[in-house]
Amino acid sequence: MINIKILNKFTIVTFMAVSFSGVVNSGIGTQTWGPASAYNVELKKVELCTSSACTTAHTLVEKTQVMDIASAEVGAAIGSYASTMTLPPIGVSYTHMRSTVDRTFTITGYAASTGAGYCYTKSGTPGIPGTYTKFETGSYVAGAADATNAGSATLVAPNDGATIVINDDSGGTIGFDYNSPSYAVSISVTDGAEDMTVVNLLTTPYTYYGQTPIIDIAFSTQLAVSNFESDAIGDGECNLFPGEPELKITIK
């Protein structure tokens, strides 16, 4: 069994570290972030690594399961996922964790617009859906933030180091990469591939000596929706893509 502890009033998950961040490389617009009340991710594999390069890795779990990491019930889902965990070899020091996830997420949330309003995720089939090379169209609402304006939407992590199409009538494009994540150590995305891998640093190195591991993870989705708006188009353009959850992982 794995002992899971609650920390700092964040939503708590176990050792699965799912996070990433995209950075818009552009001098023609503004990128903002906002909270997600639902953040469904398809987790496929979790490994412990002896370094950030993960050249030596131990697979803890390898199976596919969708879970809402913004939900208060995520602990049960993670517990189910971890039920088939293979404990690492005794005496090996691990410093990082690598997660393999699908690049398509189902998210409910919003981020600030450049104007006096917010860009919300949009339910149903939007006018221009997100792809690996195109942002998802959001819904602009003027006034104060109101989470009830957000619907469940499919947001896609774009290709790395690629040209991404802005979802407006201008036909404009911007550069996009994962070189500077806020919390992850590194992110690997192959253009057109279904999955991405994310490497996170453990708060302290972990070595298994036969005792039941205690997994502490604090997790927040307060900046888990990203929005980009082009200066050429103006307020309310709403180009949405997945943002990065905040997390802290400790294994004892």
Image (cartoon, rainbow, N blue to C red):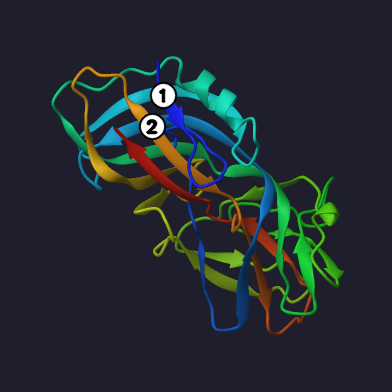
In the displayed structure, does residue 136 sit left or right of residue 60? right
Disc 1 residue crowd, few under 14, some 14–19, many 20+, Cα 10 Å: few
- The residue carrying mark 1 is 3
Q: 74 or 124: which is nearer to us?
A: 74
In the displayed structure, does residue 26 sit left or right of residue 169? left
Kindly state the secondary structure of the residue where label 2 is placed. Answer: strand
User: Residue drawn 62% across and 77% down?
Assistant: 30
Rendering coords of residue 89 (x, y %): 19, 21
Q: Amino acid at mark 1?
A: Asn
Q: 9 or 192: which is nearer to us?
A: 9
Q: Which mark is residue 73?
A: none
Disc 2 residue crowd, few under 14, some 14–19, many 20+, Cα 10 Å: some
How many circles with numbers are drawn on the protein? 2
Q: Amino acid at mark 2?
A: Ile
Rendering coords of residue 239 (x, y %): 70, 65
Above-or-below relation of 142 to 220: below
User: Residue drawn 31% across and 19% down?
Assistant: 212
Query: Does the residue at mark 1 contact the one at mark 2 (Cβ under 8 Å)?
Result: yes
Rendering coords of residue 179 (x, y %): 39, 63
Quadrant including the N terminus? top left
Q: Is residue 22 visible?
A: yes
**Which of the marked residues, 1 or 2, is nearer the chain's N terminus?**
1
- The residue carrying mark 2 is 215
Q: Is residue 54 visible?
A: no
**Which image quarter: residue 77?**
top right
